[in-house]
Amino acid sequence: MDIAIELIKIGSVGVLSGVFGAFIALRRYKHEKWWEMRVHAYKTVIESLSDIVAIYEERNKNWEHSPREPENIIQELRVAREKVRKHRDTGAFLFSNDAEAALTNFVDYQIDYAGVVDPSDIYGPFSQSSRKCLEKIVALSKNDLAVNGRWL
């Protein structure tokens, strides 16, 4: 009878430790997956914003070389801004509230293209807005994606 009780004790300890270990492993897995999804969301939006900043910097140099360049640039910028809008919408539950607000301010920023002659009429406000948003998102991503060292 004593042997049966000891076997039941050992078995119950094994079952409890197995359940606890599985719970901890599942929790860690979910946390890692969530973090990886957030990293991907921040990475794609930073890449898109970086592309927009590059468009402004590169195209501003070449504005006078082509008479059709302003229309091409405006179309290219619309496509790039739509990518940022899409990333903001699809990653809304992954971004922090500050990051989502910064992206919303960037996406909602409008300027009138009618009568554009000088490249600074387009590039000035949008270039500043895109660079400011990029810098803010990079700073927020460093803070939001920081790994707490005590669990490592």
Image: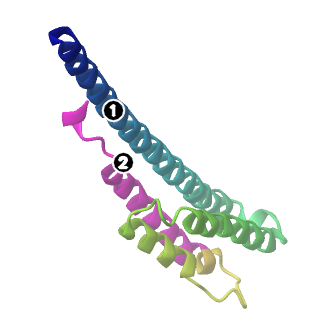
Which label was assigned to residue 94?
Answer: none
The percent coordinates of residue 85 (x first, y second) are 61, 70
The percent coordinates of residue 141 (x first, y second) are 39, 53
Q: Is residue 30 above or below residue 108?
A: above
Main secondary structure found in the magenta portion: helix
Mark 2 or mark 1, which has the lower sequence index? 1
Q: How many marks?
A: 2
Q: Residue at x 27, y 30 (%)?
A: 16
Q: Which residue is mark 2?
A: 145
* Residue 135 falls in image quadrant: bottom left
Specify the segment rendered in magenta.
Answer: 123-152
Q: Is residue 21 left or right of residue 69?
A: left
Which label was assigned to residue 19?
Answer: 1
Secondary structure of residue under mark 2: loop
Query: Who is closer to the viewer here, 58 or 138?
Result: 138
Secondary structure of residue under mark 1: helix
How crowded pointer 1 is (Cα within 10 Å; few <14, some 14-19, many 20+) is rated as: few
